[in-house]
Amino acid sequence: MPGDFRFSVPVPLRFRDTDAMGHVNNAVFMTFLETGRVGYFEALGFCHPAGTPGTVRFPFILAEVSCRFLSPLQLGETPVVHVRCTHMGTKSFRFAYRITDRDTGREIATAASAQVCYDYAAGRSVPLPEELRMRITAFEGGPARS
């Protein structure tokens, strides 16, 4: 796994992910990042209390995302999304992403996102839950770092 990333997930490509130029369309990369976030939270143990597979409790909303495209991705390749937490604030936390080709390790894209902790019932932001802070710190092997 590249650099300081402790989590990664391969994402199978589908024909529908490609555009008229024969490479994966830029909009599909947002789905890759979402797949990485969901996998990261599953790895942290934030699953539905009943343990239903695939059901994740998200204590946040996505506030910002950016992506830098470095090389084209084509059908037949398998992207791997690497995710790590780079910052935890009072109400928010940031993720860094690296997308590489599974077989060659070629860097395809880098990205970043900001998540704000959110109470869906109250409809407002809330402080970062201590449980989330502790799980991320333990998972990352220490405090978040840029």
Image: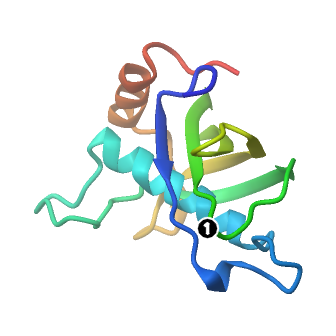
Q: Identify the amino acid type marked 1.
A: Thr
In this view, the residue farthest toward the top is 142
Counting the numbered discs, the total is: 1
Can residue 67 be seen here? The reply is yes
Q: Quadrant of the N terminus?
A: top right
Q: Secondary structure beneath disc 1? A: helix
The percent coordinates of residue 12 (x first, y second) are 51, 65
| Residue 106 vs residue 146, the one in the foreground | 106
Q: Is residue 86 left or right of residue 111?
A: left
The percent coordinates of residue 129 (x first, y second) are 40, 38
Q: Is residue 56 left or right of residue 94?
A: left
The residue pinned by badge 1 equals 31
State whether residue 91 is above or below residue 30.
Answer: above
Give me the residue at 75% from left, 71% from top: 24
How crowded pointer 1 is (Cα within 10 Å; few <14, some 14-19, many 20+) is rated as few
Give me the residue at 67% from left, 78% from top: 17
State whether residue 76 is above or below residue 125.
Answer: below
The percent coordinates of residue 74 (x first, y second) are 73, 66
Q: Quadrant of the C terminus?
A: top right
The percent coordinates of residue 35 (x first, y second) are 51, 60
State whether residue 127 is above or below residue 125.
Answer: above
Give me the residue at 51% from left, 69% from top: 123
Quarter residue 106 falls in: top right
Q: How is the image coloured?
A: rainbow
Quarter residue 104 falls in: top right
Quarter residue 38 falls in: bottom left
